[in-house]
Image (cartoon, rainbow, N blue to C red):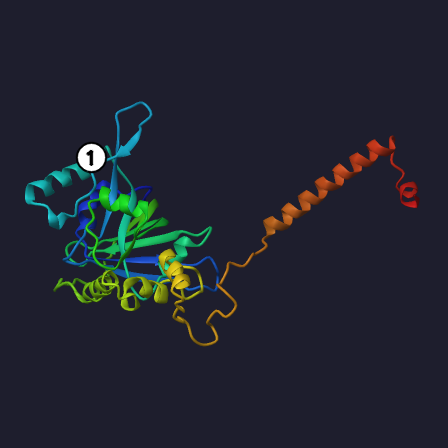
Amino acid sequence: MGAFYETLPPSLISWLLAQKVFWIASAPLAGDGHVNVSPKGISDKGGPFFGVIKETITNTKDGKIVPAVPAVPVPTVVKNQREQEQADDTSNNIVIRKFWYMDLTGSGIETTSHLHEPGNGRITVMFNAFEGPPRILRIFGKGNVLEYGTPAFNEIITSQNVNIIPGTRSIILVDIHQVGTSCGFSMPIYDFVKFRPTLNDFFEKRVANERAGKREDGIERYWAFKNAWSMDGLPGMQRGLHTAVTDNVKPIKKMVGTYAPVKGPRRAQRVFLLRHLVLVAVLSAVSTVVLMFFLLRVFGGPLDLKAFLVR
C-alpha cells in the first residue's frame, strides 16, 4: 500500500542505491508548456551516478542536524561494509533530506531549464523495482542545478566521492519535501544484461577534441548548440548560453509546426481567481473609508457631499 514521508526513510537507501534506472519529471510554469520525463541510467565507468546526503541528528536538546558520512553505492562495497551500511541506514539518528544525481550531456536540456526558471524548481524522481519484491518510490522536491566547473559542483563531487565521466554537465541536487511509495504490482520483472557505452564513448571524443584545441567539435560548442535553450524557449545550461555568445553559435531549433514558440519563451499566464476579486473589493472598501475619514478631517463636522461637489 502507498505511504508518504517528509524525508526519505533510511531503510530504503540500500534498495535505492542498487537500482540502475530512474526517471526525472519536470515542467515549465506556463500552462501550455511541455511536461518532460527523462530516463536516467548508470555506467560501469565513473560514479556513483546518484545518491543521498545523510545527516545525523545529534543528541542535543535542540535536535541539531549535521552532515553524516556520504552514502556509498551498494555494488561498490564488500559484504561486511554493506552490512554495516544497512545497519547505519536503519538508525533512528539518520535523516535524508537531499537526493542528487549526475546529469550527463544529451540533446535536451528540459530539466535544467525548468529548474532555472524563476519561481519554478519543481522536480519528481521515480524509481521502481525490476527484480525482487515490487516497489515504486517517488521523491518530490525542489531541484538546484550545480553546473560543471562551478564551486558548488566541485564541492559536491568532492564531498560525495563522485568520479565524473566525460560529458558530465551538472549535478542536480534535490531538496526533498515529500517521498511516496506505492505497490508497483503491475510492473514486469526484467533481467539486467549490460551497460550501454555509446554515450560515454561519444562524449569522450568531444572532451578530447576540446582539450586538443578542436573547439569546433568540442563539448563547449555542443552545449551551446543543443543545451542553451529548452524546447519551450527557456534558457538552459549557463555555459552553453555563454559559449553561444562568445563563439557565435546559433542554437538548434527544437520544435517544428504551429506549436513551436515564435515570440520568445512560453511564460506562465496570470489567472485571476475569486480570491483576487475579493481582495480588490476589500481594498476598495478600505480605501473608501480612509478617503471619507480624510475629507471629514479636512472639512470638519458632517460632510455635505452636495456642497463639496458644487465646489
Q: Amino acid at mark 1?
A: Ser
| Image location of residue 59, percent across then percent down | 26, 25
Tell which of 135 and 170 is nearer to you.
170
Q: Residue furthest front?
A: 213
Left or right: 228 in relation to 31: left
Residue 182 seen by the camera: no
Tell which of 184 and 199 is nearer to you.
199
| Image location of residue 299, percent across then percent down | 87, 33
Tag 1 secondary structure: loop
| Image location of residue 224, percent across then percent down | 36, 64
User: In the displayed structure, would residue 169 be above or below residue 284?
Assistant: below
Residue 22 seen by the camera: yes
- Locate the C terminus by quadrant: top right
* Residue occupied by mark 1: 91
Q: Residues within 10 Å of mark 1 (few under 14, many from 20)?
A: few
Q: Residue furthest bottom?
A: 257
User: In the displayed structure, would residue 288 be above or below residue 185?
Assistant: above
| Image location of residue 146, percent across then percent down | 33, 49
